[in-house]
Amino acid sequence: MDHPAADRPAAADHPAADHPAAHRPAAHRSRGFADLVAEGAAVPTEGWDFSWFEGRATEARPSWRYARSMAGRLGGATAALDLQTGGGEVLDFALGTAAPEAPVLTVATEGWPPNVAKATALLRPRGVAVVASPDDAPLPFADRTFDLVVSRHPVRPDWPEITRVLTPGGTYFAQHVGPASVFELVEHFLGPQPEATREGRHPDRERAEAEAAGLEIVDLRAERLRVEFHDIAAVVHFLRKVVWMVPGFTVEAYGPQLRALHERIESEGPFVAHSTRHLFEARRPRR
């Protein structure tokens, strides 16, 4: 459910439930517009735990089951780096699944201060150091440090930096958000978007950028996945949490669009959109 301009975990992407969420009607639809909007506006947005959306929004899971696949990669690594870990939930799940074969050294980066604190509290018991590092800054690590770099929904992969910190033969294994992800919802609020915006984060472009940085592409797979919002509270909370979807979103600024969408859900059922995801695996050559 992430905007191509900045890719973060999606609303139904609970890391511990790496499978399709059950599609079932929400029990919240009988409540009024004002109550639902107020609830969506009051839910805390820290971290990347999306369990609040259970029964209110669903997203089909990519077939490759990234969190579990990531756990398998961690089990074979010596030194691992998780880029833009969010609240640390995905890495925590993957390390728990990989234990006791987790890497001797595991480090995570995160750029948003509330998530740095949340990830530190969650990952410190597993021996993971969380480094506060802006998403657009050079990675604060020496050359050839990690034999595995992972990331789930990075803002924008810095391919030269990823290549630099990988050991020769090291692997980058990530799930990216693709082009025009959940744009049915984006365009309800913002209107039709330019083609250049819709095509941002295209996997073919990322392949070319990764190869230009010196990486060899091992695997690249893309899927388009069904997303459903069952009530307007889920929409409000989602847009507050995933702030790059509709920049500057507030309930007051987008009241008419919210009411129109609420009435549509009431009369037609869940609002349907589609997320795009691609699995990206690349390797730094040994030479």
Image (cartoon, rainbow, N blue to C red):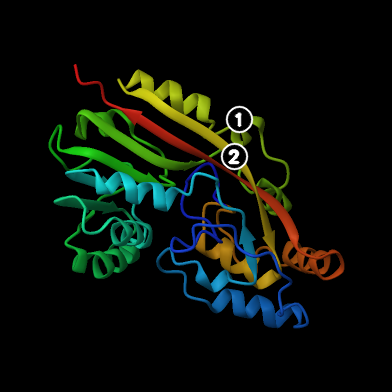
Question: Of discs 2 and 1, which sits in the foreground?
Answer: 2
Percent of width and height locating residue 257: 74, 61
Q: Three-letter amino acid code at disc 1? A: Ala
- Position in image of residue 258 (x %, y %): 72, 65
In front of the other: 121 or 284: 284
- Determine whether label 2 and label 1 are within 8 Å by CB: no
Check disc 2: other Cα within 10 Å, few if <14, some if 14-19, many if 20+: some
Residue 75 at what x, y percent from top left?
A: 26, 48
Q: Any mark on residue 137, and which?
A: none
Residue identifier under label 1: 196
Q: CA distance from mark 2 to mark 1?
A: 20 Å
In the image, farthest residue toward the top: 287
Identity of the residue drawn at 20% across and 34% down = 165
| Above/below status of 148 relative to 88 | above
**N-terminal label among 2 and 1:** 1
Determine the image quadrant of residue 60.
bottom right
The quarter of the picture where residue 271 lies is bottom right
Q: What amino acid type should be assigned to the residue bearing mark 2? A: Glu
Residue 141, image x and y in percent? 15, 41
Q: Quadrant of the C terminus?
A: top left
SS at badge 1: helix
Q: Residue furthest right?
A: 267
Mark 2, secondary structure of its residue: strand
Categorize mark 1 by other alpha carbons within 10 Å: few (<14), some (14-19), many (20+): few
- Residue 200 located left or right of residue 270: left
Q: Residue at x 65, y 70 (%)?
A: 56
Label 2: which residue?
223
Question: 139 left or right of 73?
Answer: left
Q: Residue 283: in sight, yes or no?
A: yes
Residue in view at x 44 percent, y 21 percent: 208
